[in-house]
Each structure stands twice: as C-alpha cells, then as structure tokens.
Image (cartoon, rainbow, N blue to C red):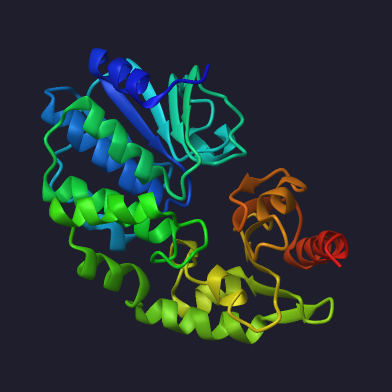
Amino acid sequence: MRIDIKECARILSEKDDILILTHSHPDGDTLGCGFALCRALLKMGKFCTVINEAEIPKKYSFLYDDIAPVRFKPAYVVAVDVATENLLGDLEGKYHIDMCIDHHGTNTEYADVLLLEDVPAACQTMYYVIKELGAEFDDRMASALYTGLSTDTGCFRYASTTANTYRVAAELIELGAENGKINRLMFETKTKTYALLERLALESMAFYDNDRIAVITVTQEMYNQTGSSELETDALAPLTRMVEGVEIGAVIKEKPDGTCKASIRTFESVNAAELARAFGGGGHPQASACRFDCGIEEARRRFVEKGSEFLSKVE
C-alpha cells in the first residue's frame, strides 16, 4: 500500500523497537537515510538500530561512530533506499518488511507500506519525513542526509538534481551539515588501495558499438593484487561515462563465487533502469545495477549485446 510523508511519520511515531535495513554494497544514500532516521527515532526515546548485510566502508564511519549499540527484538522493520528485497543481500527473507522508504521507480512494492517519491535521493524524502516527525535536527543528522543528497546526485552534477534538492541541501547546511568535508571525503579522497585498483580498472576498459559502450571489468585477482575490495568500487562506474562519445558505461565486478555484479551508467538517450531490468536488476534512469549468474567474460558479452539493442532504438 502506498502512503504519503504525513502517514509515514504517523506510523513511525506510533512504533518502537524499530530495525532499519540498508541495501547490500551500501552507498551514501541508503546509509544517510538509515542513520538520520535512526538518530531521529532515538531522540524521540525509541529503541532503534541500523544494520547491513556486510561491512560498511570506512569512509562512512562518521555517520554512526557515536551511536551506542542497542539490543532489542525488532517489532517493526523499515527498509530505506531498497528497491527490491533481493538488494538486501544475505538479509533477504530474514525479516518481514513492514515499511519501505524509497525513490526508485523500479520498486517492487515488497513492503506492507511504501513511501515512494520521484526525487534524486531517498535522503531528500527522509528530510521531509524527519521534519514531519518533529524530531530536533542536529549537525549529525544534517550531515547524514547531506551525504545521501551529494552522493546520489554526483555532487549535484546529475540532471536528476532539482531546485528542491538544492533547497534541501541549503537547509541541511544551515542545520550544520559539513558539506565541504563530506564532498572531499566522498569525491576527492582515495585510499592507496583504491588508487591502485582504479589504475588496473582503467587499463581493462574496452569499447564496443562504435565506442558508444564502455565496459570496465574488475576481477578477484585485481582485488588480491591491490589489496582493495568491492567496498571501494563505487567511484569506478562514473569513469566510464566520462569518455567522449560513450552513451552506456558499466563496471562488471567478479564476485568470489564467480558470478558478477554490474553497475550501469548512461546518459538520457538510454534508460539504465530498463537496461538493468533486462537482467533482473533496476535503479534509476541513468544509474542502475544488476547481477549475472555467469563468469565475467560471458557477463560482458551479454551486457554489450543488450546495450547495443538499446542503442539501436535511439538511432
């Protein structure tokens, strides 16, 4: 069932022992949503915690490093920025999802109630929800929400960024969000291991369909060679779209079991969400993801073939 912001806040205000789920391979938007909401609910005197299926990248530690662990039996479960239940990874099926707060048009409506808004970042919606809850904002909550806005808009560069997004960002800065620090950390700071991985990734970039498709492949051997991991690969996908003439870009990452995950980036000529949906994935019109139950070479072949089909429709 679809709900609006007012109803979402009403429900949350009546619940307690709330567990917040973030999607696998977490990014700034899902974590920003999760920890901002958690802080708001804690301020309201509720028991609340945020979990993810795996380790959270260290660069996001400022979102939660002062939150004391809380143990309780969950009575209400909320998924944030999670379009499909399988994006929960190993947490899929472990909990009944009572509520989902999201901004993906590909949301499968798996939760009992869904707050879904057409905004560039789920943190924009979460800002409105927390305001409706009446929780007092502090600089940590503002920084968490700003992180989601900044990362899901490519530091406000993507066409999906609206005037309202800028207004919310401005209000968050006024509330104490450390915008300069966050932007440097998210977009200008690299670990040595990532720098080494990025070099190998760029060397792997190959072009197809008259150079309109660019594909980077990341193997387990590349992780072993550099000391990096999948946790550090978020910044690779935008690199494919920076090459002149490329309309579809993808980073195909090999998983330990030999299967693959692809992060897809496109321009307005191709809908990345529709392209990802062809492989059981989804996301945004210009940024999406999907999985392949095959090796990296076969995954690349399938992706290029389908990408060419999509490009043929816009010629």
Residue 172 spot, x, y in % from top left = 21, 51
Residue 12 horizontal side relative to residue 156, left or right: left
Residue most extreme to the front: 163
Tell me: residue 194, above or below residue 88. Answer: below
Question: Along the line of sight, which residue is nearer the eye, 191 or 247?
Answer: 247
Q: At 45% from the left edge and 72% from the top edge, which residue is drawn?
A: 228
Q: Position of residue 10 (x, y in %)?
A: 29, 16
Q: Is residue 219 left or right of residue 73?
A: right
Q: Which picture quadrant has residue 281? A: top right
Q: In the rendered view, does 226 fall on the left or right side of 243? A: left
Answer whether residue 70 is visible to the viewer in this image.
no
Position of 136 relative to 204 (above/below): above
* Count of all numbered marks drawn on residues in the image: 0
- Residue closest to the eye, 68 or 186: 186
Q: Which residue is more in the foreground, 82 or 153?
A: 153
Q: On screen, 3 above or below 52?
A: above
Q: Quadrant of the C terminus?
A: bottom right
Q: Which quadrant would residue 310 be assigned to in this image?
A: bottom right
Residue shown at the point (58%, 50%) measured from the top left? 284
Tell me where residue 53 appears, x and y as whole percent. Answer: 43, 42
Q: Position of residue 41 (x, y in %)?
A: 20, 28
